């Protein structure tokens, strides 16, 4: 399985949530997420095909360990995710096996599903509000067909597609921190 997602900057997350509710969507409870992202080598960080990023996520009281391997299309990646019992131990484990802490991402998230599309609305510390449209598909599914489907969904939901973001939150935070130094 792989996930294919596209992210858009939102001017007004609360207004977008109201729109989804008017369409009959039931929003999740607010999730308070804290991610620490790890890489094999801090001197060689690239979001390109084959690159692997590990993440420890604390989502309210739940803790997950996640590995993502980027594919040819930037918005496509294979992912393995499972629950672990301790946030601190998961972080120590990744450091022990040689991974390096790269960046921390804090956000509030609500999500829903609309016509089989996963819709996540994020308020990311220091970055603002975003919506991610995502489909989880089989490994053999054509990435471009899914990206076209996401674009049609964005237009249907009246998302400003000129606000598409081609970076992950972790990359955006690192870039912002570098500018502020």
Image: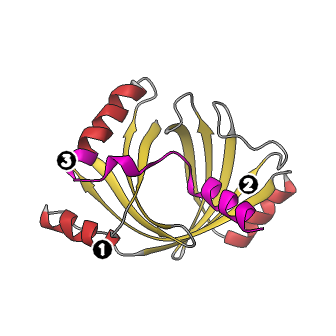
Mark 2 packing: few (<14 Cα in 10 Å), some, or many (20+)?
A: many
Mark 3 packing: few (<14 Cα in 10 Å), some, or many (20+)?
A: few
Mark 2 to mark 1 CA distance (whole Å): 32 Å
> Which structural element holds mark 1?
helix
In this rendering, is residue 125 above or below 174?
Answer: below
Left/right of residue 131 with respect to residue 173 in the rendered view: left
Mark 1 packing: few (<14 Cα in 10 Å), some, or many (20+)?
A: few
> Which structural element holds mark 3?
helix
Measuring from the top left, give residue 167's x and y in whole percent: 56, 48
Mark 1 to mark 3 CA distance (whole Å): 18 Å
Earlier-in-chain disc, 2 versus 1: 1
Residue that badge 3 annotates: 156
Residue 116 seen in render: no
> Between tags 2 and 3, which lies in front?
3
Residue that badge 1 annotates: 14
Relative to the observer, which residue lies in front, 20 or 33? 20
In this rendering, is residue 21 above or below 139?
Answer: below
What residue do we see at 78% from left, 68% from top?
Answer: 181
Query: Magenta: predominant secondary structure element?
Result: helix
Q: Is residue 174 magenta?
A: yes
Q: Is residue 98 magenta?
A: no
Measuring from the top left, give residue 35's x and y in whole percent: 62, 65
> Which structural element holds mark 2?
strand
Residue that badge 2 annotates: 38
What residue do we see at 69% from left, 59% from top?
Answer: 174
- Bounds of the magenta segment: 154-181
């Amino acid at each position: 399985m792989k996930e294919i997602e596209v992210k858009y900057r939102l001017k007004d997350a609360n207004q977008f949530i109201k729109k989804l509710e008017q369409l009959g969507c039931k929003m999740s409870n607010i999730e308070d997420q804290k991610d620490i992202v790890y890489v094999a080598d801090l001197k060689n960080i690239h979001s390109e095909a084959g690159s692997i990023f590990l993440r420890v996520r604390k989502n309210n009281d739940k803790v997950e360990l996640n590995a993502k391997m980027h594919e040819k299309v930037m918005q496509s990646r294979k992912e393995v995710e499972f629950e672990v019992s301790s946030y601190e131990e998961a972080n120590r484990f990744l450091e022990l096996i040689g991974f390096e802490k790269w960046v921390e991402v804090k956000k509030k998230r609500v999500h829903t599903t609309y016509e089989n599309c996963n819709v996540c609305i994020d308020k990311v510390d220091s970055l603002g509000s975003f919506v991610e449209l995502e489909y989880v598909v089989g490994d053999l599914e054509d990435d471009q067909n899914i990206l076209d489907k996401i674009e049609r969904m964005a237009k249907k939901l009246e998302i400003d597609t000129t606000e598409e973001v081609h970076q992950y939150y972790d990359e955006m935070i690192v870039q912002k921190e570098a500018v502020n130094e």
